[in-house]
Image: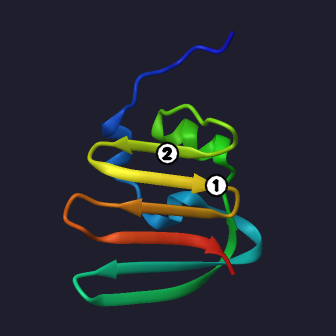
Amino acid sequence: MPCIKPPQPEKVSGMKEESFIREGKGRVRVVIESEGETLETTMNGSLKSVEEIAEMLGVEPADGKIEATVDGVKVRMQRGKLEMEFENGDRMRIEKA
């Protein structure tokens, strides 16, 4: 039986979008939306798996998805797509390009 760990906000505070991307083959699109401005870029690599990101955030995935709030950040993820919504209304999406 797996051990359920409590969320660890201190692990999340220093993360950047690169934390969720694995170097290697493929391309991902990173979109950051903030107060009417949108920044979009494409990076080499692939999005880490749901299980890897769940472990990074200290949450348990359910049915291959993550839907959780960690340190005030709403996190939704399914295979190939990660969405984060911050308390100030900013949003970040990382998805397979």
Residue tagged 2 = 67
Whether label 2 touches label 1, CB < 8 Å: no
Q: How far is the residue under mark 2 from the one under mark 1? A: 9 Å
Q: Residue at x 70, y 71 (%)?
A: 45
Q: Position of residue 55 (x, y in %)?
A: 56, 36
The answer to whether 84 appears left or right of 9 in the picture is right
Position of the C terminus, as image quadrant, is: bottom right
Q: Foreground: 36 or 30?
A: 36
Q: Residue at x 70, y 57 (%)?
A: 79
Q: Secondary structure at mark 1?
A: strand
Q: Which quarter of the figure has residue 10? A: top left
Q: Give above or below for 89 relative to 42.
A: above
Q: Position of residue 33 (x, y in %)?
A: 35, 80
Q: Residue at x 40, y 78 (%)?
A: 32
* Residue type indicated by callout 1: Gln
Are there few (<14), some (14-19), or many (20+) residues within 10 Å of tag 1? some
Q: Foreground: 35 or 39?
A: 35
Q: Position of residue 84 (x, y in %)?
A: 42, 60
Residue tagged 1 = 78
Position of the N terminus, as image quadrant, is: top right
Are there few (<14), some (14-19), or many (20+) residues within 10 Å of tag 2? some
* Residue type indicated by callout 2: Glu
Q: Foreground: 38 or 27?
A: 38
**Dot placed on the residue nearer the N-terminal end, 2 or 1:** 2
Colouring style: rainbow
Looking at the rendered structure, the number of numbered marks drawn on it comes to 2
Q: Position of residue 12 (x, y in %)?
A: 37, 46
The answer to whether 19 appears left or right of 12 in the picture is right
Q: Foreground: 12 or 88?
A: 88
